[in-house]
Image (cartoon, rainbow, N blue to C red):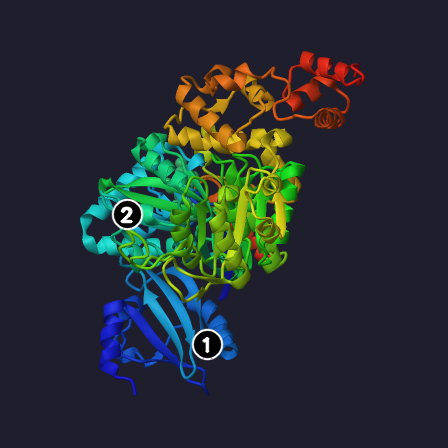
Amino acid sequence: MIQKKVCLLGAFAVGKTSLVKQYISGIFSEKYQTTVGVKIDKKVLDIQGEPMTLILWDLHGEDEFQKIRASYLRGSSGYMLVIDGTRLMTVGVVEGLQQMTQEILGGVPFVVMINKADLSDQWEIEHEAVEGLRERGWTVIEGSAKTGQGVEEAFFTLANRMVDV
Amino acid sequence: MHEPSLFTGLSEALSILVLKREGVSRSFHTLHSIPEWYRTFLGKSLEDFPNLLPDLDSPFLKHFLPQVHEFLDGQTTGQLTSGIWCEQGADGKDYQFEATAVASADTQLLLIQRMDRGELELQTVLQTAREGGLQHQRDMAEHKQVERQLGGKLERSEQLRDDLLVILDRLQLGTIMTDAQGRMTFVSRVAQELLKLKESDVIGRLWHVIPAFSADDKAALEDMIRQPIGKRTKVPVVFESVRKRRVSLEIDVQQDPRDPQRTIFFLYDVTEVHDLREVLTGQHRFFDLVGKSPAITDVYARIQDIAPTDATVLIEGETGTGKELVARAIHQASPRKGQPFIAVNCAGLTDSLLGSQLFGHKRGAFTGAMQDHQGFFEAAHMGTLFLDEIGDMPLSIQTTLLRVLQEKEIMRVGESHPRSVDVRVVTATHQNLQELVKTGKFRSDLLYRVRVARLNLPALRDRREDIPLLCDVFFRQSRTVTKKMDIQEISSDTMRQLMKYHWPGNVRELKSALDYACIHCHGGAILPSDLPPECWESVDRPLGGINSEVDEREQIVAALTRAKGKRAEAARLLGMSRSTLYRRLDSLGLPTKD
Ligand SMILES: Nc1nc2c(ncn2[C@@H]2O[C@H](COP(=O)(O)OP(=O)(O)OP(=O)(O)O)[C@@H](O)[C@H]2O)c(=O)[nH]1
Ligand SMILES: [Mg+2]
């Protein structure tokens, strides 16, 4: 079976672990347990009639204490950049990570997930900012690890792109 | 030969799997029997298990192994760590590991360590650490909640506490824990590195002994400890580390959640940010000197020229201009830094006292000399001796000093054999030594000897543009020392006043004026009325410090040039009222119109 490595990247507490958990087992927890290092999970899905195993690398949040190791990224067929809609600063983090990933992996496919859509009244990210990201040619999906909105779509979009490459 | 049972025991105890790489096949073999936890993780019984590892079901190891081989093939010594990873075991539970490849002369090992014990604590602490780092982005309530969680966890057992320390030790931020009395109980690896401490030297001692902290830093930290948690802010601390590296820290003072009497200092290294900011705002500090005016940056440049040599230096400048700071900067920028810097004020000491202080004495050399005594010259051996107010040095001592400078030897009072010393001498005076030579109070040969290199410090009124910067630095210090953290700023009226005043006591006077103002201030901003009376009463004095007409003319022309001809601005620069300036211009025959 084809196996593809996918990394989840973003600032801390944006919901990377929650997205994976929602995607794999449909569970959400309010409790925040920060990821140390990398957490690895697998998910089998059907892409264009073929089964594919996604090896999901849920990386720790990038911040001043832990920088993402370049070696974690190697061998990825795609990645998901996660933004927390309620924290504007998480956009900047993703921009930095995109650049770093681009340098290491070249132009492999990625999608941007703006998470916590269920908290839209607390969003700090304006509509224009989202459009700004799209104008760069980025695929931006708004969703929520809590309600499940957009989660399946985001991973599915990414997986499809990886097959098309 | 390895002793398998020892390895097995260690492996179980430390939750670590030790694999050895065989040279030819490049395969890994365990050095001990497979620990129980690894078998549970893999879900295989011992019989299924060839003594060959690691199991390549692990996506992470599959990814890491090529890097390990590459590393071991290329390295004869050293190690490569994988970083922590987490995978689901066959039992459905999450397992955390970290792998390290170790290359040494005769063995190549791969260690796989299980990190699960204390997993929650690791996460909580990292989380707390992150929250600390991004504190300004997070609200206090959430932060507190995490602290409570951490507290609950920590109370559970001492074992967890030890794990916590191990974890704190791994973090990129430095941590120091103290007991209720302020004695250090834990200093993390990063903290030791940042502060250049050895844990064994400081454990059990008060945190105040940390040499990197200046008196002001300590006052600020003490003050922060007394503040209620919600009011605490990070305390900036800047110091000079090895190789002239300037280290900037921000110190977050937290309570130990287990016991609010105890304190945890989190040290964030912001040197890089600080340096960048420095570059952005232009160079305005040099060691402890502050300012970016041409007059003071010239001094910085002079210091850099003078420092690397061993030449004796004479620093001239009015009282309060910072002569000792310059002397220290010369020492710090010289190859002698790291060796002693000793400052002696020669004013007000009798010959015999100063003599024995500088050169030491033998027991019984005079009444009261109960013991052999080492003088400052010996104490400063290999380092720098700073002789302040050298103009006040008694003539007899001047003679001895001259000999010491020539011979590089000293003789303790009452002794007859010389001891050789290697000391760089930096001197300072606020007097005109040439004048003292004329009146016979200073030896001319000594004058030539000490002023091999000369450095003139500008008076504060000759670098007024530095006043706002200096105020900024001193205001923060004064506010902390006087415990008036509610004062937010210096009002613009006050700043104007400070810019105008002629500062006969120079930087020192400015510093004490701000101390005074902070004590007298009762609002959120320092007002002109909070300043010491002389600062606002004498503003209209005609040009303090300018005594000859030539000087005055030059200064006024310079100010006009700097102010691009604008009279009002020139008056401000000169620290005089506009009407005074017009009067002066008139009397000097200079045009009074812009
Ligand atoms: N309301 C809401 N909360 C969410 C959502 N996704 C995540 N969270 C919460 O946000 C917090 C962080 O989620 P995590 O999934 O642990 O974040 P992470 O990006 O893995 O964080 P790190 O591992 O520290 O980098 C948790 O408290 C989650 O419950 C969401 O869609 N809606
Ligand atoms: Mg996570």
Between circles 2 and 1, the one closer to the viewer is 2
* Foreground pick, A10 / B130: B130
Residue B48 seen from this side: yes
- Which residue is drawn at the image coordinates 32% and 72% (left, top)? B17
Numbered tag placed on residue B362 in the rendering? none
Residue A51, percent from left and from top: 49, 61
The Cα–Cα distance between marks 2 and 1, rounded to whole angstroms, is: 39 Å
Q: Which chain contains the residue that carries disc 1?
A: B
- Is B363 above or below relative to B574? below
Q: Which chain contains the residue that carries disc 2?
A: B
- Which residue is drawn at the image coordinates 42% and 39% (left, top)? B348
Residue B52, percent from left and from top: 36, 80
* Foreground pick, A64 / B282: B282
Residue A57, percent from left and from top: 45, 57
Residue A47 seen from this side: no
Q: Which residue is mark 2?
A: B206
Question: Which image quarter is the C terminus of chain B in?
Answer: top right
Query: What is the secondary structure assignment of the residue under circle 2?
Result: loop
Q: Which amino acid type is marked by label 2?
A: Leu
- Is circle 2 on the same chain as circle 1? yes
Q: Residues within 10 Å of mark 1 (few under 14, many from 20)?
A: some
* Foreground pick, A149 / B304: B304
Label pair 2/1, CB-CB below 8 angstroms: no
Residue B284, percent from left and from top: 59, 40
- Which residue is drawn at the image coordinates 32% and 31% (left, top)? B227
Q: Which amino acid type is marked by label 1?
A: Thr
Query: What is the secondary structure assignment of the residue under circle 1?
Result: loop
Q: Which residue is mark 1?
A: B77
Q: Residues within 10 Å of mark 2 (few under 14, many from 20)?
A: some
Give residue B232's quadrant in the image: top left
